[in-house]
């Protein structure tokens, strides 16, 4: 599975207010006003500074004593990225911020979010924990949450620690994504991925009340 199977910015059909509300709930997750302390932190791979900035802030706030960093392939969509790889870059920033090396567990083989979770499961015994703080982009939170639940179990508590991203000068977040063309396209693409990956069994399926069936883009 690769996240490139559906374009990052597909054409978007006309969306009414109800559809926008459903997609917001499915794609984004509500951030708690105060995050509880968790047993472990899970950082999905990526090159955005939010991956390490969010992880550093959470660790220094005492929200998790151990950090699993994923995303080791150094590839995106089949194209080689500049070194270091995602996991190395994130770890480098965490170490520079004073987080001890013994607090980090590096997953170095994955090339997409599904592999992030599957390969991390081979390195860490999640049956020993009850709660996971996971770091990812805000508009990827719904998909990442359902990936974790599918492969680590629905009995764990998953707490999102998300960050907004900017595309072509436009910030994408749960409150204003539908106001811009690029926001609608990015979030619609995420929604389509949640539907497709759920149907395929790669992630936990959407609840029926959140399913809107669109024609393939």
Image (tube, helix red, strand yellow):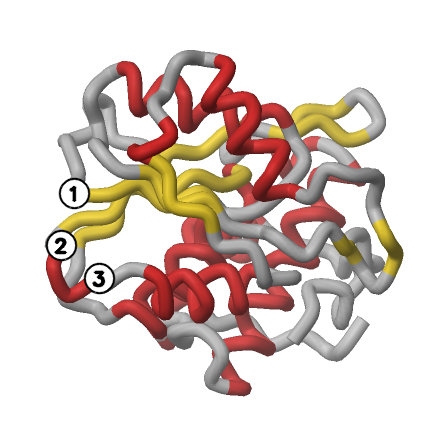
Q: Marks 3 and 1, how far apart in space?
A: 10 Å
* Residue reaching furthest to the bottom: 200
SS of the residue under disc 2: loop
Q: Is any part of residue 217 visible from this angle?
A: yes
Residue in the image at 29% along x and 15% along y: 60
- Evaluate if marks 2 and 1 touch, with contact meaning CB atoms under 8 Å apart: yes
12 on left or right of 48 = right
Residue in the image at 55% along x and 60% along y: 113
203 on left or right of 1 = left
168 vs 108, nearest the viewer: 108
Q: Is any part of residue 22 visible from this angle?
A: no
x and y, in percent, of residue 152 in the image = 29, 68
Q: Is residue 100 above or below residue 75?
A: above
Query: Which residue in the protein does label 3 denote?
Result: 126
Query: Which residue in the protein does label 1 denote?
Result: 39
Q: Marks 2 and 3, how far apart in space?
A: 5 Å
Q: Quadrant of the C terminus?
A: bottom right
- Evaluate if marks 2 and 3 touch, with contact meaning CB atoms under 8 Å apart: yes
107 on left or right of 207 = right
Q: Neighbour class for label 2 at 10 Å: few (<14), some, many (≥20)?
A: few
The quadrant holding residue 178 is top right
> Which tag, 3 or 1, sits closer to the chain's start?
1
Residue in the image at 54% along x and 57% along y: 19
The quadrant holding residue 159 is top left
115 vs 108, nearest the viewer: 108
Q: Marks 2 and 1, how far apart in space?
A: 6 Å
x and y, in percent, of residue 17 in the image = 55, 48
Query: Which residue in the protein does label 2 denote?
Result: 129
Q: Is residue 60 above or below residue 191?
A: above
x and y, in percent, of residue 174 in the image = 51, 35
53 vs 167, nearest the viewer: 53
x and y, in percent, of residue 199 in the image = 52, 85
């Amino acid at each position: 599975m690769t996240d490139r199977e559906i374009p990052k910015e597909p054409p978007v059909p006309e969306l009414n207010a109800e559809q926008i509300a459903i997609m917001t709930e499915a794609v984004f997750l509500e951030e708690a006003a105060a995050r509880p302390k968790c047993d472990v932190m899970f950082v999905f791979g990526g090159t955005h500074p939010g991956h390490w900035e969010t992880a550093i802030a959470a660790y220094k706030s005492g929200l998790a004593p151990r950090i699993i960093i994923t995303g080791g392939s150094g590839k995106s969509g089949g194209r080689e990225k500049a070194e270091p790889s995602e996991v190395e870059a994130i770890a480098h920033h965490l170490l520079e911020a004073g987080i001890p090396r013994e607090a980090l567990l590096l997953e170095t083989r994955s090339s997409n979010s599904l592999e992030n979770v599957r390969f991390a499961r081979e390195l860490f015994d999640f049956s020993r924990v009850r709660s996971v703080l996971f770091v990812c982009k805000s508009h990827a939170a719904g998909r990442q949450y359902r990936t974790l639940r599918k492969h680590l179990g629905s009995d764990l508590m998953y707490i999102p620690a998300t960050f907004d991203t900017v595309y072509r000068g436009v910030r994408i977040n749960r409150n204003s994504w539908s106001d811009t063309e690029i926001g609608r396209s990015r979030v619609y693409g995420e929604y389509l991925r949640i539907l497709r990956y759920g149907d395929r069994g790669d992630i936990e399926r959407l609840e029926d009340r959140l399913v809107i069936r669109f024609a393939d883009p």
